[in-house]
Amino acid sequence: MVNVLDSVSATKSETNRELAKAKTRHALLKSALQLYSVEGTCGMSMNKIAKGAGIAQPSFYNHFDSLDALQQVLSKQLKDNYLSPMRMAWVDMLEDYPTLSKEDFNERCQECLTLIFDAAFQNITLFQRLIEDSLRFDSKIERKGLGGLITEIREEWSKIFMQGLQSAKCSFEESDVHLCVDIAAAQVHELILGCHQQRYSQQQAIEMLCKNFDGVFGPFFTKDRLRIHG
């Protein structure tokens, strides 16, 4: 009986240690995100992150091998948070695009864009930092901190769009897709910031983007089949 009790106690202790480690790891990621939002890439350091999480700097290595390793985990979480809610919505809309009436396309496009705007406005300060860093660092030459995240997201958009085109059985050149996605992404980012500055409403921005997207992406589909405009 004693051995059984000892085993149960040891299991509980191990569980408590794992929970404590997971809690500290989460605190480090939260601290890093807050620090990045305020100070950007240049303000990131293990000491500041550890202090924000309430631990000593040497303990940082119990959770992450390096500052870069932490930022890679954080970058993946942010990318998933930004893309996951809308990935299939975009793919489904693109697959259905050739048979959508103009009204249906606008409705579906507005739903997708609302997801993007909502994701950005969950932490607009962070979004602004990411945009600033994407302009400051060339991700193909130097991946510093989270500076390449916007570029990675843009690459994901290209993959999503190509997946939609393939589902719709439309032919395309990858370079054309990258060009159109870069144009669309620049417009989206600019209008998100414009909404934040209260230069116009989110609904105005989304309605304008829908019109632009129809013009930018429509030619991919009209090469192979006629659009139905209702």
Image (cartoon, grey):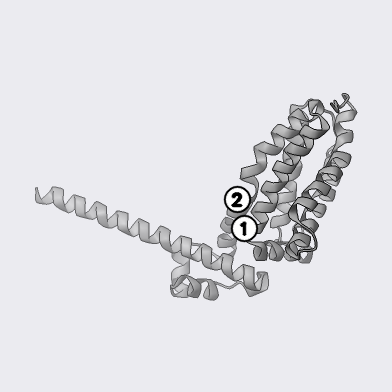
Query: Dividing the picture into quarters, in which one does residue 10 lie?
Result: bottom left
Position of 176 with respect to 14 (left or right) is: right
Left or right of 165 in this view: 12: left
Residue at 74 percent of width and 28 percent of height? 167
The alpha-carbon separation of the residues under discs 2 and 1 comes to 10 Å
Residues under numbered marks 2 and 1 in contact, where contact means CB atoms less than 8 Å apart? yes
Q: Nearer the viewer, residue 154 or 197?
A: 197
Badge count: 2
Q: Is residue 159 above or below residue 147?
A: above
Q: Position of residue 172 (x, y in %)?
A: 85, 33
- Looking at the rendered structure, the kind of residue marked 2 is Asn
Q: Position of residue 150 (x, y in %)?
A: 72, 56
Eye-nearest disc, 2 or 1: 1
Q: Quadrant of the C terminus?
A: top right
Label 1 sits on a secondary structure element that is loop
Q: Which mark is residue 177?
A: none
Residue 217: percent from the left, percent from the top? Answer: 85, 38
Instruction: Specify which label sits upstream in the sequence, 2 or 1.
Output: 2
From what the image shows, is residue 67 above or below residue 91? below
What residue does disc 2 label?
81
Residue 72, image quadrant? bottom right
Look at 76% across and 61% down and name the residue there.
193
Q: Nearer the viewer, residue 207 or 81?
A: 207
Q: Is residue 65 at least partly visible in the picture?
A: no
Residue 9 visible in the shown view: yes
Mark 1 residue type: Gln
